[in-house]
Image (cartoon, rainbow, N blue to C red):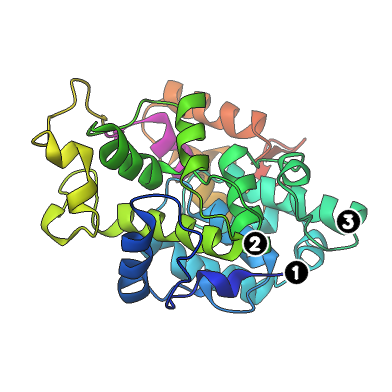
Amino acid sequence: MLLVSSLTPSTPSLSSVPSPYADAVLGWYSVHARDLPWRAPGVSPWAVLVSEIMLQQTPVSRVLPAYQAWLARWPTPAALAADPAGEAVRQWGRLGYPRRALRLHETATIVTEEHGGELPSTREELLALPGIGAYTAAAVAVFAFGRKHAVLDTNVRRVLARAASGREFPTAQPSAAEYRLAESLLPENDATAARWSVAVMELGALTCTAAAPRCDECPVTRQCAWLAKGRPAAEIRPVGQTYEGTDRQCRGRLLAVLRDSREPVSQARLDAVWPDPVQRARALDGLVADGLVDPLPDGRYALPA
């Protein structure tokens, strides 16, 4: 049964809250939660999955219009599966990491053909779908179906690292101990656990941020181990990714030419958008290898059929 309504701000039931943070975080969330369409009551599991895929390494402000346009065009997995994969890549636009669009198309096809058009509800079944890893499987199981799992995205991991472990930033990859900690903090009631998962994620996104945490506005100031230690700086700090001049930027330029054309494009049109022929050829080969571009027998290129 769909339990997305449990994610909307409300006065939470705290009778089963086991952690020193949950009551404060849930109360804060009831006041400060953003009004996001994928949290609305009655939103479909498919819409939750689309949001989770789009939000990977992409800020909410960029995702919102893309999410709304995607679901207006393809409100169900069957609707997306009926169109060519290239249309998914075209619709993806400039969100970045366009292989996510291909994986969504593959997932829509599998869900339509093997699951009767309904997204499976368990973490294990979700993990079997293309492009869905541990985080996304847990997030969809929790936010779309009300299952009880630890949902560890970057924001949640940072909040728990600071509040419970006294570290400014978590390690590069979640450890078994980190999962155990996150599981131990889940309220017993499934609906409350789902609301806790989104609430702590929101806290990391809005208040316990990476660059400028607003500790004076945080609901768990008194329980925060990192603040109690005087906010010690991490020895190794996260390094932002560069973009200008990279293969990724080159790939984006090439793919934009194909997205903007309803006909196959010539090599000359691709050559015109990037000056370095070696980097351009490498980027184009990568797009072909990833299934994002189809080379045609006449030497032109197109989005996948």
Q: Residues within 10 Å of mark 2 (few under 14, many from 20)?
A: many
Disc number for residue 1: 1
Look at the image and tell me whether residue 23 can be seen: yes
Q: Helix, strand or loop at disc 3?
A: loop
The residue drawn where x is 64% and y is 46% is 137
- What label does residue 115 carry, if any? 3
Q: Amino acid at mark 3?
A: His
Q: Are marks 1 and 2 in contact (CB under 8 Å)?
A: yes
Query: Who comes first in sequence, dot 1 or dot 2?
Result: 1
Picture layout, residue 7 above or below residue 237: below
Front in this rendered view, residue 36 or 270: 36
Depth check: give the residue in front, 165 or 277: 165
Q: What is the span of residues highlighted in magenta in the rendered image?
A: 240-252
Kindly report which numbered mark, 2 or 3, lies closer to the viewer in this rendering.
2
* Residue 7 place in picture, x, y as percent: 51, 69
From this view, report whether residue 219 is shown above or below residue 301. Answer: below
Residue at screen point 57% across, 28% down: 286
Choose the circle earlier in sequence order: 2 or 3: 3
**Residue occupying image coordinates x 66% and y 73%:** 73
- The residue depicted at 51 percent of the width and 33 percent of the height is 180
Amino acid bearing label 2: Gly
* 245 is within the stretch colored magenta: yes
Q: Quadrant of residue 117?
A: bottom right
